[in-house]
Image: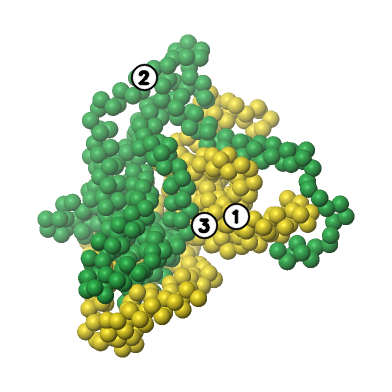
Amino acid sequence: MTQQIEEEADALARAAVGAPGPQRRPLGRRVRSTASAYGFMAPAVALVLVFFVASGLLLLILSFTDLSSANFSRAWNFIGLDNYERLFTDPFFPKIARNTVFYVVTTLIVFNLGLALVLALVTTSIPRRAGFFFRLVWLLPRLTPSVVYILMWQRIGAGDPFGIYNQIVPEFLGASGGNLIFGGSPWAFVILTNGFNGASFGMIIFTSALESIPKDLLTAAKVDGAGTWRIIRDIKIPMIKWPLLFIATYQTLSLLTSFEYILLLTEGGPGLFTTEVWALTSYKRAFATYFGNSQWGYGATWAIVLVTIALLLAVAYVKLFRFNELIEEPRIENL
Amino acid sequence: MTTVETAPPRPAAGPIPRSRQKMGRYFAYGFLILSIIPILVGYAWLIIATVSARTQGLLPKNAEGGIGGFTLSNWDFVFESAIWNAMLNSLLIAVFMVIGVGLASTSGGYALSRMKFAGRKTFLTGTLVLHAFKAEMLLIAIFFVLRFLGDIPIIGGFIGFNTVGGVALVMVALELPLGIWLMKGFFDNLSWDMERAALIDGASRFRVWWQIMVPQVRPGIAALSLFTFIVGWNAYLVPFTFTIGTKVANMPVFLNQLISDTAPVNWNLVAAVGLFQMIPLIIFFIFTQELLLNIYAGGSKGT
């Protein structure tokens, strides 16, 4: 209905100024309007070209070289697929790959999806202001600078007499007195730190989705005698199916390619590659190797393989969500 | 909906008894309070540690091992120039990001929302993918790009490797996909009547954008600015990777140097510096709560 009116208005406006229809725009005008569009796009396009496109290509080229701080000043030495061979025959490759899958799947299911959904369901079932308060507290990790945030967790997990967990939790719940991050369960802390940050994202998205479920639907179900659990299972979850899928794919991608908290918390340790994930390996090979030897070429190889996996996932998710429908044609240009 | 309708009718369908409702309420609050304990404990430690000489767990301790020993000496760092240098660097990165991301997203978002041009679809799909994708994977290549930019005469000294400008430029680029989608979303929601009238009257695209459209998306620009400021202020990985030493360090990098370069670490000093760094964030947190929750929903949804 509205669209029809708009179309009519469109036609009227065109008739009023004698402008041609969308199909018959003169070439000069088309060129000029394209030029002005590129003018508006110029800053964004320049930045994307330099820091994503060119950098991505450079990363690919680097992955075929043995460039490191040892031969930095000389011309780039191309070594074919040697880096790739080295990557897949690395004795720690299986461990790092397993770590990555474990880290992504566990954090995603327990926190970024599971806890996020529970938090959204619970905070929308209590009075509005109280729900808002709890969501706000949950937003804190996201606002806290990563260095300070990890600092807090390090103090929580520290050994006696400084550790907070050891101090306030009774002994039978695992307070051994030692350092919990490096002595006890490094994975628990890696997943907790990332999960406490990641859960808030899903929580906020799910909350707005849950709040937009029509109230009559829920009332009708209650009148019919459906219990809380049935309402959640049969109405709420099916109604927020798309946000759930969106968060699942989006967070898989971001967990797969992020490593900042792990770098700050354990640096992949303790010991050999205990909590090292793929993205962190790439970074450490290139920037943080011992004896000051930065292997940029080899690090780039780890990055390229992960980028390829992530891009395949990303393409799948663009297809799955039919994002092309989001990218509808702009109307104003039909003037 | 249909599932409920076709469900077999329960024999004693009626309102849930009050006592059960009350129990559910208690359960909900209990769960939520338990869930936020780690967050609250972390902050409690930060605040207690900043005002005490030493802490064990959450307890401030005096020299004899009893409770006490409160002091403000941890805050002596505010009289040193290093912290203000780091703060200035943080501020420069954050402000540069607000301006850079704001301008590029507001102009790019407008074109993507309102104009038709070759490459529009590719650009939108591309930035959408980059949105979830942490560009941290590209840091190795960006390292070389920055070294290259540093060799450009005149401006090279400001945007190359190991400069605040270079860090800010990289950060602008990395935040851009989010900014563009956010602003495109705001422009998509505007009615196009005024804009079209102006165009028919012969106004240029630029004038329409600047005088008619930009004033209407001010709330969007405010939200984006707040978001990018926080990202820039908290930035750790990019500044850490692309700077060396203390002169160009921003606050998070400075704080990390404090933790890793000194042994034994003075945790109470570290806590004070950490809290000091969070002052602007605390102000935002108190005064823009509603906006913050909205940005983190809308700003990341990609629409």
Spot the green chain and give its letter. Answer: B
Classify residue A220 by image quadrant: bottom right
- Locate the C terminus of chain A by quadrant: bottom left
Are dots 3 and 1 on a single chain? yes
Local packing at callout 2 (Cα closer than 10 Å; few below 14, some 14-19, many 20+) is: few
Q: Residue furthest bottom?
A: A24
As drawn, the residue found furthest toward the left would be B154
Marks 2 and 1 share the same chain: no
B202 to the left or right of A136: left
The Cα–Cα distance between marks 2 and 3, rounded to whole angstroms, is 42 Å
Q: Nearer the viewer, mark 3 or mark 1?
A: 1
Q: What is the letter of the yellow chain?
A: A
Dot 3 or dot 1: first in sequence order is 1
Q: Are marks 2 and 1 in contact (CB under 8 Å)?
A: no
Q: Chain of mark 3?
A: A
Give the total of numbered labels: 3
Amino acid found under the numbered disc labelled 3: Gln
Alpha carbons under labels 3 and 1: distance apart: 19 Å
Measured as percent of width and height from the top left, residue A133 is found at: 54, 39
Element marked by disc 1: helix
- Kind of residue indicated by mark 2: Leu
Q: Is residue A98 visible?
A: no
List the residue tagged with mark 3. Answer: A251
Q: Position of residue A260 (x, y in %)?
A: 43, 48
Which numbered marker is on residue A210?
1
Q: Which residue is mark 2?
A: B72
The residue furthest right is B11
- Pick whichever, A23 or A176, lies toward us: A23
Instruction: Name the residue at 70% across, 63% down.
Output: B1
Q: Residue at x 22, y 70 (%)?
A: B203
